[in-house]
Image (cartoon, helix red, strand yellow):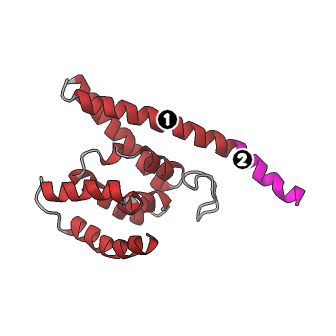
Amino acid sequence: MTQVRFYLYLPWLTFLQQLVDNPPPYPFPALSSFLISLSRVYPPIFFKPLFACAASDKEFTVVNHLCTLRVHAKYVPDYWLRDVDMMCFALLGDAGKASQSGERGSRLGQLILLVELVSQIQAVRHAKEGNVNEARHVSTVKFASGLESKLALLVEAKVFLFPLRSLLPLFI
């Protein structure tokens, strides 16, 4: 399975760059269905630009990954609200780890992703006020409550474990 993922990943990078540089006309149902099925079959590969953006502290890199994420979101309508686990990992993965500048805390990419996520949730809320799509509103509420509970658990675990990590050298 790892070999299959590796072989899929290299052409995937080229494909993503082509999508950003020269996107097909919108809407493009064949591309949308391909990306949706890929997000379900190979989520780590599909969400790789999301993780790369979250892991970055450099503005130029974050902007490049954000362009890729915008293209994904254009052809996969529920991109930002699709997978609670992937979004949770992107928002809190390696949070608290020392960054390149030596400071602890969230990276620039994680903060940008949080702003984009909040923007998407607000867009659904504003659409709800206009009574546009009840099903989308319900799925967004489920996503937000699931994300909130998972983030709360991870934040609590990290807050509890970080003080213990600093004590480990004393016991060894």
Crowd rating for badge 2 (residues with CA inside 10 Å; few <14, some 14–19, many 20+): few
**What kind of residue is marked 1?**
Glu
Q: Quadrant of the N terminus?
A: bottom left
Q: Quadrant of the C terminus?
A: bottom right
Where residue 48 sits in the image (x, y, percent)?
Answer: 40, 62
Instruction: Name the element at disc 2.
Output: helix
Instruction: Name the element at disc 1.
Output: helix
Where residue 140 sits in the image (x, y, percent)?
Answer: 34, 34
Q: Name the residue tied to disc 1.
A: 148
Looking at the image, tell me whether mark 1 or mark 2 is earlier in sequence order: 1
Looking at this view, is 38 or 96 the one in front?
Answer: 38
Q: Name the residue tied to disc 2.
A: 161
Looking at this view, is 2 or 162 the one in front?
Answer: 2
Q: Is residue 54 left or right of residue 156?
A: left
The quadrant in which residue 60 appears is: bottom left
Q: Which segment did they paint magenta?
A: 160-172
